[in-house]
Amino acid sequence: MVEGGERVHLVDSLNVTVGLGLLVRIAARMRDEGCSAAEIVAKIEELRSRVRLIAFVQTLKYLKMGGRISGSAAVLGTMLGISPVVAVVDGEVKSVGKVKGRQKILEYTLDFIRQYPIDTGYSVVFPHSCAHDMARAYQEKISRAFGLSGSSMSELGAVIGTHVGPGCYGIGYIERARPEKKED
């Protein structure tokens, strides 16, 4: 419909916020390196299923206000000091677990990264919503544990930030490619 429309390529990233940002950075870098649009599309479509993003929600107030959890679940979770773990799964932000306390957040992250190893050829981002100090301490611990250098921090966008409220933080990265299994 638009002049030059053949140069427009639509790609469903299957991601939001930080995951989408990771893919955009890769696409921009490939563009700057002189890759064709077709090469960029193929790479983004290959990588989109390897984006990993987990975050730890510190207050249940905003999940309750947004209708994501019931009032009774919010009260009980707050009393017990439980932090929901959210992740992008099949293109949707979903609750994938619960932890209690900062040490459990660290343990959950370490286990998650061991299960889905980081591809250090791509950026690692530590997103947060008004939780700079907690996110910085988290970033330092995770970076030290996995020998990461050059990671960055990012403020969560308004849409996701509205759902999770202040105090949320986590990690986003591209998972290392898994070797293809050989058929017997």
Image (tube, rainbow, N blue to C red):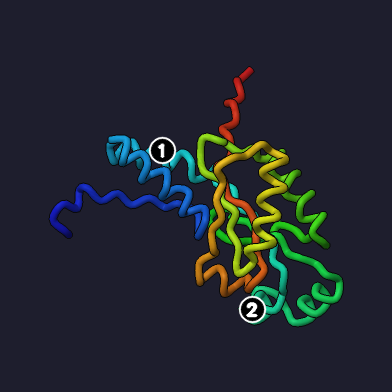
139, 26: nearer the viewer: 139
> What is the quadrant of residue 129 in the picture?
bottom right
What residue appears at the point 48 percent right and 41 percent down from the top-left corner?
A: 47
Horizontally, residue 98 falls left or right of residue 126, namely: right
Horizontally, residue 95 falls left or right of residue 23, namely: right
Q: Using the image, tell me which numbered label, if any, was put on residue 67.
A: 2
Residue indicated by mark 1: 43
x, y percentage for residue 118?
A: 61, 39
Identify which amino acid the numbered label 1 is placed on. Answer: Lys
x, y percentage for residue 20?
A: 47, 54
- Tell me if mark 2 has few (under 14), some (14-19) or many (20+) residues whose alpha carbon lies within 10 angstroms of its own: few
What residue appears at the point 55 percent right and 46 percent down from the top-left corner?
A: 51
> What is the quadrant of residue 62 in the picture?
bottom right
Residue 19 drawn above or below residue 131: above
x, y percentage for residue 124?
A: 56, 46
Horizontally, residue 182 falls left or right of residue 30, namely: right
Identify the image quadrant of the C terminus: top right
81, 125: nearer the viewer: 125
Identify which amino acid the numbered label 2 is placed on. Answer: Gly
Secondary structure beneath dot 1 equals helix
113, 12: nearer the viewer: 113
